[in-house]
Amino acid sequence: MQRTILHIDMDAFYASVEQADNPALRGKPVIVGGKVRGVVSAASYEARKFGIRSAMPMFQAKRLCPQGTFLPVRSKRYKEVSDVVMNILCEFSPLVEKVSIDEAYMDITGTETLHGKPIILAAKIKQRIRDVTGLTCSIGIAPNKLLAKIASDLNKPDGLTVIEEKNITEFMRKLPVEKLPGIGKQTSKELHALGIRVASDILRFDPSFWVARFGKHGLCMYDKASGRDNSLVQPHKEPKSFGSENTFPRDINNTEEIKKWILVQSEKVARELRKRGYMAKKVTVKVKYADFKLTTRTRSLPDLTNCTKVIFDTALELLNKVSIKKPVRLTGVSVSGLSKGFRQVKILEDEYDIKQEQLDRALDYIASKFGKDALKRGILVE
Ligand SMILES: [Mg+2]
């Protein structure tokens, strides 16, 4: 059956929320960011005219546009608006898959009798989002998720783009290769060097050529180049892992300091497990150095856990296997091998385990009541 998929992407989301909340900022260059390493998180379209882009250092943005309004990230507010937008989408179809704070897919196959043609429905969605939140979004309509995502990006902001089944081949023949999702600057540079300009050029080489060159990513790229994609819109995805990572305000080469971050991150993932009723079987530590080289180490646990101490101790063991001779830019802790449920009580429960569980529960309670910074574990107090 031919499907109809929408990809909805909010325009310059953080900056647009700021403009919606403060009418004095409308039509003006607004730049949101600065918390981590002073980089831009979002720039309004007015600010983009000055050459400002996400991930650009704030000082550079200030230099390009001294008259701009520079604002800190208000994550809580953006999450609130995001929830409103997602709820609006759910009014039109039960098949909504949220992919990030400002992006979602919808499967609207078979809704024509109820809502009219896909383009009419998409226009209604745009209008409703604008009425309720004052924000614009761009929507791509296509027979699959891949093309819907590409389409939503083609006419930003406030775009509405349709790719029809009968035009796919022609479309891929014109699509610049860097517009394929997952192809970054580096890959597109390499592709250009091979004489590959548009998506369908990729199909001139065998999949084996791409695998030899880019590994798994190469195969993925080959599949995308045809414009085919069979993945489904998945409304309630079971999480596969929980993770927490931080890019440090400055590079660190002091192991003790890194351990503190590992504790904060272990606590965060463990708390997420407990809050959502999951147990984990594997712990992974990720270390990214100042030169952007990345190392990860994973260990399977003997028992499923949601205990901060167990995750932290495992993460520390993993960290010990990683060289900290170079300055470190980022660390992360994640847990995977998730199952729903709570810890099984062993017949001879270790008194220590029970104490840890009580401690976790007490800290969770305090965090929920007074905020996560209300109480800190010993090694975090300087
Ligand atoms: Mg967006």
Image: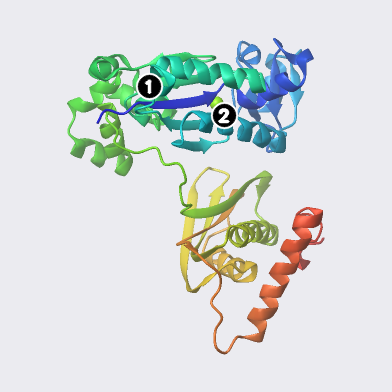
Where is residue 319 shown, x and y percent of the image?
Answer: 56, 63
Frontmost residue, 270 versus 286: 270
Residue at (28, 26) in percent of width and height: 227
Q: CA distance from mark 1 to mark 2?
A: 20 Å
How is the protein colored in the picture? Answer: rainbow
Q: Tell me if mark 2 has few (under 14), some (14-19) or many (20+) residues whose alpha carbon lies within 10 angstroms of its own.
A: some
Residue 189 visible, this orientation: no
User: In which image quadrant can residue 254 be found?
Assistant: bottom right
In the rendered image, which quarter contains the C terminus? Answer: bottom right
Q: Which residue is identified by label 2?
A: 88
Q: Tell me if mark 1 has few (under 14), some (14-19) or many (20+) residues whose alpha carbon lies within 10 angstroms of its own.
A: few
Ligand 1, image quadrant it occupies: top right
Up-down relation of residue 380 to residue 178 (above or below): below
Residue at (48, 52) in percent of width and height: 239
Q: Which residue is identified by label 1?
A: 113
Q: Secondary structure at mark 2?
A: helix
Total count of labels? 2
User: In which image quadrant can residue 222 be found?
Assistant: top left
Up-down relation of residue 344 to residue 80 (above or below): below
Residue at (68, 75) in percent of width and height: 356
> Does 209 sit left or right of 242 as displayed?
left
Up-down relation of residue 51 to residue 143 (above or below): above
Where is residue 209 shown, x and y percent of the image?
Answer: 20, 36
Q: Disc 2 beta carbon < 8 A from ligand 1?
A: no
In the rendered image, which quarter contains the N terminus? Answer: top left
> Does 352 sit left or right of 320 as displayed?
right
